[in-house]
Amino acid sequence: MEINTVYCRTHSSIIINSRSPIPPLMLSLVFSLVFSLLLSLFATGCVVKQGLEEDDAESPNGPIAGTLTRSPDDDADGDNYSIDEGDCDDQRYDVNPGRPEICDDGIDQDCSGEDLSCDAVDGDGDGVSVREGDCDDENPAVAPGRFDVCDDGIDQDCDGRDLSCLEVDDDGDGYSVRTGDCAEGDPRRYPGAMDQCGDGIDQDCDGQDLDCEDLDSDQDGIPDRIDNCPRDYDPRHLDSDLDQVGDRCDNCPATANPNQNDADQDGIGDACETLDDADGDGVRTADGDCNDQDPTVYPQAEERCDDIDNDCDQYPDEGCDSDLRSVVISFDGGPSLLGSTLADPSACAQDPTVDENCDEVPQRQINLSPFTIEEHEVTIAQYRRCVRLGRCTPPLRVPNIESSLRFDDTQFDRLPVTWVTQTQATIYCRWLGGRLPTEAEWERAARGDSPLTDRSYLRGDTLPECQDANIRGCHGDLKPVKTNGDQNISGVHDLIGNAHELVDGYYDPLWYAVTTPQDPTPPTQANERQQIPLRGGSYQSATAFSTITYRGFRMLMRRDRALPEVGFRCLFER
């Protein structure tokens, strides 16, 4: 005897015999019962199913005569979903594509192909799950991107630590107590401020008021009263023609001209324009000779590895052991994405403060000309050479701030140079024949070989861990360049962490909505606080603020400020 099981929407079952011999006297009674049963089945929505466990079971020769088989169009468990409609278990009423998923119970209730992990659930409704970085999924006030209340014992922004109030810049001057502000509450006093001599106030936070006899406007270590170029940094105090005007500011450094006459206002003094190749090397000063008193110095001359710019291209000793320039990575011109999809452009257009990522939208497809960019951030050793040759000014020094006192210590040579302003970074890049990258160029370099792929990090949207980048305090301080996994497939290092990076131009939260699609130029008009954008994360920034599209909303700084976690790299046009 074979058994047919009848499943009903009321979940009742009944067993009938389909192949046993039936006595003639019972035949009419059996047919009557079967007929009544079929009427009942059709009336209640029941389905006859062959076999105890099998779905639409068949014999080797096809369906068994006298049985009812079920089509994929049927809904065996009565949950309003058939197999054809995506029901992955048509024997369970609680499993279908419309069911809410119960996490980590081993059952795929919503037929998505897998059981939901509880780490992927946003338990507190703050929009972020544990898998996405929520460090307390029972508290909606705690998630990556939240503002951290200092010294309350709670890590609101999930960066691994509570914010210290010593790190807060209450007076808006760009510095906190931890970064050397000696008068938090007075925006006119901060490291690097212009000290008014003899007023009894320590404006620059160096521990003392400036004596007017020691006033040094260009901060080259030579007081203005004896400096031959008091507005131009030149610690070597050079004066080749002995006319009391230093070479750095002399419009004709090879010929004495203390009056600095320049009738045509072309930047070349009259004394030089009347000379006819003083050193006999075949090139006049007016034609590009950068030292017409030295016949070994002229355009296209061979570099002699003597710290002198023999070929007059600004950078001395190309190809020599003292040549510390970085390897550069080349990028072809073409289309690239700019920005993210992390905020609603329409809502942001109405209120730019509605979402912290509003300055990253709308995401645009732009076109960039080809360029090369340094493979890592400029190091202390590289920048020190520029200072030693008198082309750059030293980084800011702040008493009792250890990171600002590393510049002369060679053990830190491979660290990114920090404590420099945007202007200082620009001067260094010009010395190399380059410039700071624009935000669009920096982001293109960070996108590597996939410029049109929408992603947050170098390898997609997966959150980087401590071995992937120097972020969120994992290593506690800056690390030497190129020493962790923070590298994209194109070979550009230290984009996610280590030091934030200066770029060209000012900050405008609405720039992406109005910029041109071809080689977007950065904003040239400053806001009232002279703010500039920063790109990339730093050794202490939260993961959420270390994406390749983040513009530094929480770290915006003034153009004339220098900070311990902000460095830069240079770009060169091709």
Image (cartoon, rainbow, N blue to C red):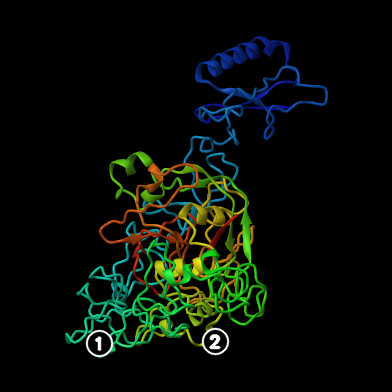
Where in the figure is residue 190, as x and y percent of width and height?
27, 77
Disc on res. 210 = 1
Where in the figure is residue 492, as x and y percent of width and height?
60, 62
Q: Mark 1 vs mark 2: which is more N-terminal?
A: 1
The residue that appears at 48% across and 87% down in the rendered structure is 408
Count of numbered tags: 2
Left or right position of 418 against 192: right
Disc on res. 81 = none
Task: Quadrant for residue 462, please give it.
Answer: bottom right
Quarter of the picture containing the N terminus is top right
Which residue is denoted by mark 2 in the rendering? Answer: 410
Left or right position of 152 against 243: left
Instruction: Determine the residue located farthest toward the top in the rendered image.
Output: 28
Where in the figure is residue 526, as x and y percent of width and height?
31, 56
Q: Nearer the viewer, residue 253 or 43?
A: 253
Q: CA distance from mark 1 to mark 2?
A: 30 Å
